[in-house]
Amino acid sequence: MTEPTPAPVQAPAAGGPTFIADGARLGRVLFSPGAVFTELNQRPSFWVPWIIVSVVYAALNFFQRPFQQRLKDLMLERAGRPVTPPSALGDIIGLVLTPVGLLVLCAISAGILYLIASGLGGETTYKRMLTVVIFTFPVTLIQTVLTVIVLNMRGVSSIAGPQDMMVSFGADLLLPGDSQIGYFVRILLMGISPLAIWSLAIQATGLTLLAKMGKGAAWTAAVIAYAVFLLVGAGLGAFGMKMAGG
């Protein structure tokens, strides 16, 4: 008489508690996106990663406050208005607006990604696209960290206008130093960088697993979404620079 085959033992959820597990996934997705999105395929996650990313963003924004205050003071001086010292209320408002702004950005990004993926034959849901979007943000956090480091190396006194707040790791660095290009083209070129390609690779992997797309279709969807946000971001950035007197 043969003994019954024992039921397979299920491995415990990676990382234990949700915050620890999702925090670990946000770090692992940088180097093992396939493994991370395979885990998320059964149970997509957004809210906890969003909280974690929001906290990191808020902390990074705090370190940029002296540079933002310097630019604000310059703009007030040029407008002939009195310069106001930084206030605790401004810091609190910044802390509140950071997660809200991130949530709105994720919601819009997921909606666009959902439409593109569905249009290319993907089988997915809006929640799954929210998961893909939030798990591509670690690359953006790395770029923000590098931006803070560069700004601190330059020093607050180096800020003479909005253009001095721009830190590039993109294709515009390949242009000759005396090149005269508009802000739209410059911001567009800034968005074409190794970090952007890294983010694209993570997003394409997420689409492959969470939208059941082939690699070619997933990369196509990721590139289309990237191009849309690059063009919109360059347009808004150029407009903002013009309004700030850059």
Image (cartoon, rainbow, N blue to C red):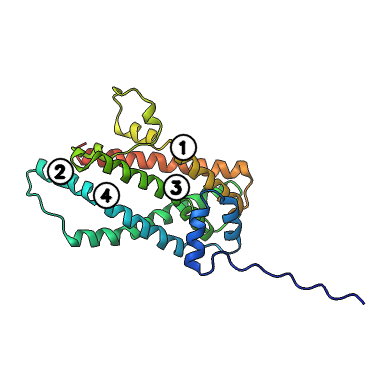
First-in-chain label (1 vs 3): 3
Image vertical order of residue 148 relative to residue 45, above or below: above
Q: Residues within 10 Å of mark 1 (few under 14, many from 20)?
A: few
N-term-proximal mark, 1 vs 2:
2
Nearer the camera: disc 1 or disc 2: 1
Mark 2 or 3: the one toward you: 3
Contact (Cβ within 8 Å) of mark 1 with mark 3: no
Question: Given the image, on which type of amino acid does mark 3 rest?
Answer: Val
Residue bearing the label numbered 2: 75
* Residue 7 higher or lower than 55, as above or below: below
Q: Residues within 10 Å of mark 4 (few under 14, many from 20)?
A: some
Are the two marked residues, 4 and 2, in contact with CB atoms closer than 8 angstroms? no
Labels in figure, total = 4
The residues bearing labels 1 and 4 have C-alpha atoms spaced at a distance of 23 Å
From the top left corner, tell me how far across and down residue 177 is, in percent.
31, 24
Are the residues tagged 4 and 3 within 8 Å (C-beta)? no
Q: Earlier in the sequence, mark 1 or mark 4?
A: 4
Residue 95 seen in the figure? yes
Amino acid carrying label 1: it is Pro
Compare residues 45 and 216 and report the one nearer the observer.
Answer: 45
Residue 30, position as x, y percentages in the image: 51, 49
Please report the residue visible at 60 percent of the width from the left and 43 percent of the height from the top.
217
> Residue drawn 54% across and 48% down?
31
Q: Which residue is mark 1?
A: 194
Q: CA distance from mark 4 to mark 3?
A: 18 Å
Would you name the residue on which mark 4 appears? 64
Label 3 environment density (alpha carbons within 10 Å; few <14, some 14–19, many ≥20): many
Q: Earlier in the sequence, mark 4 or mark 3?
A: 4
Secondary structure of residue under mark 2: helix
Name the residue beneath numbered marker 3. Answer: 139
